Image (cartoon, helix red, strand yellow):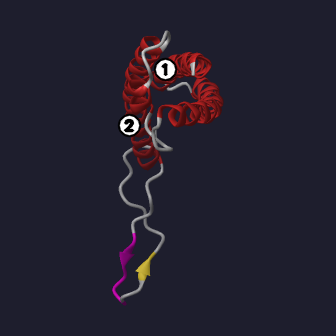
């Protein structure tokens, strides 16, 4: 049982380190969004995708160890990590595992908030680009002719004075 707990603690430390890297990358993404830097945004997005894949691998490995430890503690398969840590016998490493679970939960909340903020910034940037494109090249306004046919050639009023 002690070996399982040590392995679980090791996995939790790796997951926490990966989450911290993801949080740092999300901060970089936020800065790139604020600067409207497409190149920086592409680089950071690739980094985040790599870290997300790495996190999935770590989570899968941790889940296997978690299920083994859960069976040893008499928990049903698929029991949450928080339940497992509480059910662990009072052995060295239990408190560290509890602290790591709390740290993981807090870091995951911070990351989720940062991602939510980045999504809002990206949506605002897309709205700005859409409005800018409409101002420069407005969609043609469709009007009806006296015979009931639709005139497809007319443009609506332009927001940009192109004669200058």
Question: Depth check: 132 or 48 in front?
Answer: 48
Please tell me whether mark 1 sits on a helix, a strand or a loop.
helix
Quarter of the figure with residue 45: top right
Eye-nearest disc, 1 or 2: 1
Q: Which mark is residue 152?
A: none
Which of the marked residues, 1 or 2, is nearer the chain's N terminus? 1
> Residue 109 location in percent, x, y?
37, 26
Around disc 2, counting alpha carbons within 10 Å, would you say few (fewer than 14), some (14 to 19), or many (20 or more)? few
Q: Residue at x 54, y 30 (%)?
A: 69
> Residue 86 location in percent, x, y?
38, 25
Residue 129 higher or lower than 29, as above or below: below
Farthest bottom residue in view: 147
Quadrant (top left, top right, bottom left, bottom right) of the N terminus: top right
Q: Residue at x 55, y 19 (%)?
A: 5
Question: Depth check: 36 or 26 in front?
Answer: 26
Please tell me whether mark 2 sits on a helix, a strand or a loop.
helix
Question: Gap in Å between the C-alphas at discs 1 and 2?
Answer: 21 Å
Magenta stretch: includes residue 160: no
Q: Residue at x 38, y 37 (%)?
A: 124
Residue 133 higher or lower than 96, as above or below: below
Q: Is residue 100 left or right of residue 58?
A: left
Q: Which mark is residue 124?
A: 2
Instruction: Considering the whole magenta stretch, tell me its main secondary structure.
Output: loop
Residue identified by numbered label 1: 23
Q: Are marks 1 and 2 in contact (CB under 8 Å)?
A: no
Question: Range of the magenta residues?
Answer: 142-147
> Residue 19 location in percent, x, y?
52, 22
Q: Residue at x 41, y 86 (%)?
A: 149
Quarter of the figure with residue 7: top right
> Residue 13 location in percent, x, y?
55, 15
């Amino acid at each position: 049982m002690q070996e399982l707990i040590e392995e679980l603690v090791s996995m939790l430390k790796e997951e926490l380190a990966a989450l911290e890297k993801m949080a740092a990358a999300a901060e970089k993404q936020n800065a790139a969004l604020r600067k409207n830097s497409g190149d920086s945004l592409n680089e950071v997005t690739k980094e985040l995708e790599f870290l997300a894949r790495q996190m999935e691998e770590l989570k899968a490995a941790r889940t296997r160890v978690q299920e083994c430890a859960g069976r040893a503690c008499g928990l049903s398969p698929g029991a949450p990590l928080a339940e497992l840590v509480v059910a662990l016998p009072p052995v060295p490493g239990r408190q560290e595992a509890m602290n790591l679970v709390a740290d993981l939960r807090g870091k995951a909340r911070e990351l989720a908030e940062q991602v939510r903020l980045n999504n809002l910034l990206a949506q605002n940037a897309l709205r700005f680009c859409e409005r800018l494109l409409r101002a420069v090249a407005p969609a043609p306004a469709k009007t009806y002719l006296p015979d009931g046919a639709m005139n497809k050639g007319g443009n609506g009023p332009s927001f940009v004075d192109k004669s200058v």
